[in-house]
Amino acid sequence: MFSSTGPKFILRNAELHGLRWSDIDFEKKLVHIKRNRLYSKRLGTYEKCPKTKTSERDIPLSNGLIADLKVYMDWFRLADDNFDNKLDNYYLAVNIMREPESVHHIGTWLKKFEERNGFKAVTCHGLRHTYCSMLLSKNVPIQTVSKYMGHSDSSITLQVYSHFIPDTQEKVVNAINLIESEE
């Protein structure tokens, strides 16, 4: 389930794997990004703070995603009657046994998806890129998108995604015409 909803959050793979149930605020419809879950041969799987200070952020959740998360939460409750008192003990990205997924799971799942459906090079980062591009194409302000992406500066977002911002030439011409008509 989380393989398909993660991109809606604009999350980095490590941020997605670091999410715990206590990071979800159902009332305010937010997810709090507080940690990364990573893997190295030397350390194994471990947690660390997000990439930058701005990577610690709150991201709004859609009504549809809130509904999906509530159904997913009910699945956790089936296995643990005391689940609501132990929200910080559970990651969201888990296997069928409710154990934390490997940090490579989403990449592996996407690879299988590619092979079955004839796609090429679908990655978690690529889905993050696509979602950001979609937001910008819908005229969501660059500063807002940058904040949700966790970029340290909106110039980073602008540098990478400026070609997805709808052409504003028509808006400029309309504004000039309006100013001239008022003179």
Image (tube, grey):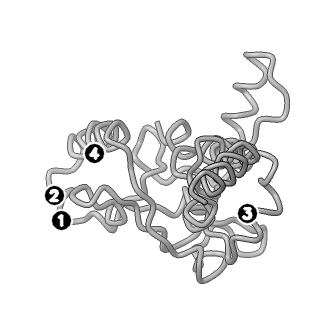
Q: CA distance from mark 1 to mark 3?
A: 39 Å
Left or right? Give the position of 86 relative to 32: left
In space, the residues marked 2 and 4 are separated at their CA atoms by 12 Å
In the image, taking residue 115 as reference, residue 104 lies left or right, namely left
How far apart in space, not on screen, are marks 1 and 2 (Cα)?
Answer: 6 Å
Residue receiving disc 4: 73
Quadrant placement of the C terminus? bottom right
SS label for mark 4: helix
Mark nearer the viewer, 2 or 4: 4
> Quick one: 77 or 149, which is closer to the camera?
149
Mark 4 or 1: the one toward you: 4
* Residue bearing mark 2: 82
Query: For the residue marked with disc 4, what is the amino acid?
Result: Met
Q: Earlier in the sequence, mark 2 or mark 4?
A: 4
Look at discs 3 and 4 and give the one toward the viewer: 3
- Residue denoted by label 3: 157
Q: Label 3's element?
A: helix
* Res 122 quadrant in image: top right
On the rendered structure, is 28 left or right of 81? right
Question: Up-down: is 21 above or below 50?
Answer: above
Residue 26 percent location from the top left of the image: 25, 55
Instruction: State the image quarter where residue 12 is shown.
Output: bottom right
Upstream in sequence: badge 3 or badge 4? 4
Asked if 146 appears above or below 93 in the picture, the reply is below
How crowded pointer 2 is (Cα within 10 Å; few <14, some 14-19, many 20+) is rated as few
Number of other residues with Cα within 10 Å of mark 4, as a class: few under 14, some 14 to 19, many 20 or more? some
